[in-house]
Amino acid sequence: MTEALLPKELRIFALSLTPSAAIHLALLLRAGSAQPSPRPRLIMLIYGIGLALGALHSMTYFGPIETWISNFQAGYIYICIGAASFLLITANALRRSDSDLDRSRLRVMFVGALLGFLLPALATVLTSSYQIQIPYNLALIPTIFFPISVAYALLKYSLFDLGNALRVGLSRIALLALLVAIYAIIAFLVAPWIGDYAKNPLVPIFFSVLVVALFNPLLRWLEGVVDRYIFRQDYDSARVQEEISLHLRTLDSAGSLAHGFIDRVTQALGIGSGVVIYRAKESLEYLAIATESMSPSVAAIAAEAFAICDIWSAPDYRGVARAEVTTHPRYRERRDYVLGIFARCNAELLMPLVYERQVRGAVAFGAKRSGQEYTAEDFRLLGTLTDQLALSLENGRLYEESVRAYHRVEASNRKLIEMNRIKKDFVANICHELRTPVSTIIGYGEVLRDPNFTGDARNMLNQLVNNGQELSSLMDNLMNFSRMEADGPSAQFEIVKLREIFTGLEAMTRRLIRERPIEFGIHLESAVDTIESDGQKLQQILVQLVTNALKFTEKGRIELSIRKHQEAGQELVEIAVTDTGIGIKREDQEIIFEDFRQLDGSSTRQYGGTGLGLGLCKRLAAALGGNLRVASEIGVGSVFSLFLPIRFSEAATEAYPRKRDNRLLL
């Protein structure tokens, strides 16, 4: 001691004050959050004992050797007392701590103090007081654990990083110790047969081969032992990662991937609850998937998804633990706000879902069912899996879009095939509709041209006129349809006298009925006489509706009625054409307004027509600011109701832009 570089008193007091400082440090670090300072008298007593022992040690250095040795041994006993006190205070704080972060910190500090403080002190006391021969260098080896553990306690904001480093360090140290033990055993066993093994290369060679063969298996086994018994990990992280990665590589929707992910992770790691929230790249809505226990709260969590994602900022996208928020200076300004998010999510750990350097969502993991805290390996594994999940969810979104696009294409393809069939039927029907009256006209014309004909020429002439009118009506429908396809239906609004239109319709209808067993009537409310509309288009609609009623009514009654109607605060007029014809099935009451559509499109059908009439009526009614509806029952008849505004207004026809000449276009 007298030949060392430092003065002996400095080294003496450093030795005697070390246990005092250790007890003081344990009192300061007995919990992770800020604690009241220990009582001054207690601190003075602790350091007073250390100073007294140091002073006695220094003053008796040149006195009787027995006195100096006694003081020397008392100093080492005090070191043991300090180490034991450090362990007791730390164990008590560990038992009372509610924070996972604090418990992890105190547990590692406890192990470090046990190995690096108490054991070397006991070895020194046993050697100095009881002359038990313990190699000095061997007793000093564990002392490295104490400063490492204290450094861990001081650097408390990097729990998972330091825990991972500690896991690696413990497993490597254990591997080194095991290999040294194996070498010692080999040397001990073979020494009697080979003599001086230091001069014989057989043992080193054999040991080297053994190290090469056993290194990786031993390391994996020791890492498993460290995880299981020190970090209390009860799952195989490699197997869990492989299983969940396999699930995330499947081609499925984002919702199915998220649901499978959260179920597998919570089950494998023993987590009580979990929630996944994610917003796709081009979406404003969040996908929210939760375990069964969190299902009632998932809507509320999704509502504050933007607030959850705001926890992270570039470039730090690490997961956040609840215990970290309570102590980390980074959250000082918004600690209560972030802790509130943890509470509402029932989470102990929040992991971000990052895609293209943007936080698209998060995964909230609740507490473990076993009550244990999350370890560094848990943190590493969950970070890796959530990184994969973000990419998988985006791929799932693209998959959903491709499926929707495929279904749209399939629907369009089916519609095109159906339209192609309808148009083919339409062409066949047109040919049939043209051939029938043309054949009739030609036939009657040839008969009338015969000079020897003595029959009823007037009846034949009536047939010729009727067939000519059918051809004219057919041509009108085709021309109107072609015009609307090219330019859209137009309307020229003016005051229309309904009585005049109804008088013309009555004359036309009675002429078409002739001697058929059909009654025709008109019911006109006296309060409705004029409306503001396009008279030509209105007459075209009503003529089509009346001729349709005549076509499908063999006998009975056809009635044309008009009355006022209020709808959505607007005053309308309802013009209804009622018949007692064959009726229309409920499922067919929408498709009859489609172009080229006929309920019986075959060329052998009983009722003729092109399938354009009702579609034209629907378009013309829309151009007039109204709409056309149907109510029908099979075997009873049909009612086609045309609703039009009594007075023209922009609101009634807002879907149709006006031209300068007051024409409305589709």
Image (tube, grey):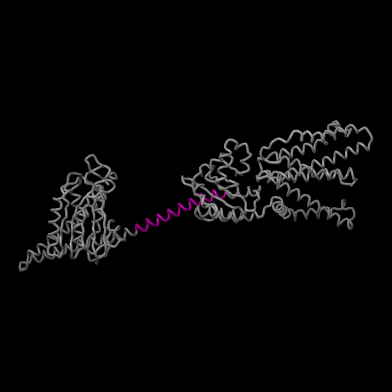
Left or right of residue 97: residue 432: left
Q: Quadrant of residue 472?
A: bottom left
Q: Residue furthest right?
A: 64
Q: Which residues are magenta?
A: 387-416
Q: Quadrant of the N terminus?
A: top right
Considering depth in this image, is 253 or 270 the residue closer to the camera?
A: 270
Seen in the picture, residue 634 relative to 542 is either above or below; the reply is: below
Left or right of residue 159: residue 444: left
Q: Is residue 513 located in the magenta-colored stretch of the structure?
A: no
Q: Can you give x and y, in whole percent of width and height, for residue 648 in the image? A: 23, 43
- Residue 403, visible in the rendered structure: yes
**Picture residue at 75% right of the left edge, 33% below the top:** 40
Q: Can you give x and y, in whole percent of width and height, for residue 42 in the image? A: 77, 35
SS majority, magenta: helix
Callout count: 0
Q: Can you give x and y, in whole percent of width and height, for residue 79 in the image? A: 82, 40
Considering depth in this image, is 312 or 610 the residue closer to the camera?
A: 312
Q: Can you give x and y, in whole percent of width and height, for residue 289 in the image? A: 52, 51
Considering depth in this image, is 639 or 475 the residue closer to the camera?
A: 639
Left or right of residue 101: residue 490: left
Q: Is residue 395 located in the magenta-colored stretch of the structure?
A: yes
- Residue 358, visible in the rendered structure: no
Seen in the picture, residue 243 relative to 39 is either above or below; the reply is: below
**Picture residue at 13% right of the left edge, 57% below the top:** 508
